[in-house]
Amino acid sequence: MIPEPWDIESRRNAMQTAQWLLETGAVRYDPQNPCRHGSGLVSPLHVEGRLLLSHPGTRGGVIRLALRMIEEEVTDARLDAVAAAEGAGVPFATLIADRLGLPLVFVRKEGREPCSYKDRLEGPVEPGWNLLLVEQLATDGHRKARFAEPLTQAGCRVAHAFVLFQYGIFDAIHDHLAKLGITLHALCTWWDILDAAAAGHFLDARAQAEIEAFLADPRRWTADHTTRSASNAA
């Protein structure tokens, strides 16, 4: 089967994004101090996309790819605003909203105390608006559901979410987002980073093999390393 031109471009953009993440040190491999997720799984890999922002050329390149993806894939309705999910994705949401000339609103997973009257949504929105939810990354999608909740309660439609990076290994993400009618758009996945790391020799053979083992079966990798950590502590 001959790939479509957009599929080829999407793959090229994914590899470029992965290379930028590796070159800027945004990807950290540390199996001794695994990253813990809300799902209970642990990962030997960490991504800190904010490091991209320190490099003007790379920052501009990532935003150009993001805008191209949004233009090509978010076509079912005109966007009225960009919603920035609290956390590391806020600067990316700000840049995207600025380039699109759209209002920017902020949304939290939980209400703030003691100022609960501010609740979880900051910024004016109108019932019927179509919002693009922007965050730095996606694992299994459960965070997106919590961020979308106050937006839909305000009468807005959230049919699309954009992230710089998604794990690409958690099937549950489709279940979580499909129930909400949200389509996820991501510039790259761990598989793209693994391919880019191999092509650019960013990791040695041992690290490459360990990452492949995690990606192939994250639950087993979690079980093995949780048991190992418990044994070492004892």
Image (cartoon, rainbow, N blue to C red):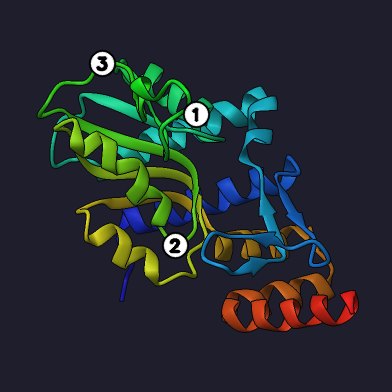
Sequence order check, earlier mark of 2 and 3? 3
Q: What number is the disc on residue 90? A: 1
Furthest-left residue in view? Answer: 128
Between the residue at mark 2 and the residue at mark 1, the CA separation in whole angstroms equals 20 Å
Q: Is 103 on the left-hand or right-hand side of 128? A: right
Badge 2: how crowded within 10 Å, few (<14), some, or many (20+)?
Answer: many
Task: Provide the secondary structure element on which disc 3 rests.
Answer: loop
| Whole-percent x, y for residue 209 in the image | 75, 78
Indicate the amino acid at tag 3.
Pro
Is 177 rendered above or below residue 87?
A: below
Badge 1: how crowded within 10 Å, few (<14), some, or many (20+)?
Answer: many
* Residue in the image at 36% along x and 58% along y: 7
Considering the image in quadrants, where does the N terminus appear?
A: bottom left
Indicate the amino acid at tag 2.
Asp
Q: Is 90 on the left-hand or right-hand side of 2? A: right
Q: What number is the disc on residue 140? A: 2
* Residue in the image at 42% along x and 38% along y: 110
Can you identify the residue that label 3 sits on?
Answer: 124
Indicate the amino acid at tag 1.
Val
Between marks 1 and 3 in the image, the one whose residue lies nearer the viewer: 3
* Residue in the image at 32% along x and 38% along y: 70
